[in-house]
Amino acid sequence: MYATLGNHDTYPLDSFSGYTPQENEALTAWAPAWDVFTDSAKERKTFIDFGYYSTPLTFKNGTLIGETKSKLISFNSNFCFFNNFHQYAQFKDPGDIFKWLESELLELEKVGGAAIMLSHVPNVDECNRQFGKRWHALMDRFQHVVRWGMAAHVHSQMWQVQRDVIGKQPIGVNFIVGSVTPYQVAGYGKQPNF
């Protein structure tokens, strides 16, 4: 099991700061409970500081999948959510997340590795400004490394076909999972998904 942060995981709701290390008090307070998702002190520090991490994919018995050439990357997409008012005042790379993501993907590219992306807010229509565009550009550049992605947030189960920035050709697919709890929107009930 792997985890990623959601927009309801901080207080106040949707409020995700994190432009300097350990700026987000909620994340710092409960991050030690997430230690099971990280394998090294460096990964734990990155998660406590900014809410993202990567970890080698392993089988249930703990052996590595693909001799460390496969990673799960938990990307903190709460930085881009349009209801996160912290992001309206920032015009820099939050927590160096793009620098980190590019470095992770370059490392995998060098060894012929693969990545599975995990995020909460999908890069569909709720990522603001340049954040969504930069994320999309990295997925385009590393389409041969990122095998697929998984997101949540919208309370509906669906598939998203990602397209390249220029030619609009398919480059990847994301599974956007449903919700465990029902959710009412404008009279339309969204049933639980399992």
Image: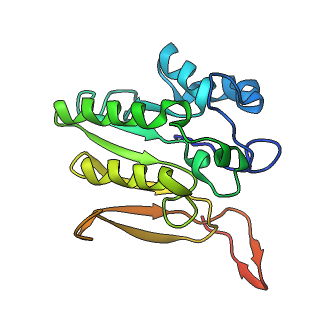
Closest to the observer, 5 or 126 = 126
- In percent of width and height, residue 74 lies at 49, 40
Image quadrant where residue 191 sits? bottom right
Closest to the observer, 119 or 126 = 126
Q: Is residue 168 above or below residue 17?
A: below
Q: Is residue 41 above or below residue 43?
A: above
- In percent of width and height, residue 112 lies at 16, 36
Q: Is residue 162 left or right of residue 152?
A: left
* Residue at horizontal 48 percent and vertical 16 percent from the top: 42
Q: Is residue 157 above or below residue 42?
A: below
- In percent of width and height, residue 101 lies at 39, 36
Q: Is residue 151 above or below residue 22?
A: below
Instruction: Identify the colour scheme used.
Output: rainbow
* Residue at horizontal 77 percent and vertical 83 percent from the top: 186
Does the image show residue 23? yes
Give the residue furthest to the bottom.
187
Q: Is residue 149 left or right of residue 144?
A: right
Closest to the observer, 34 or 48 = 48
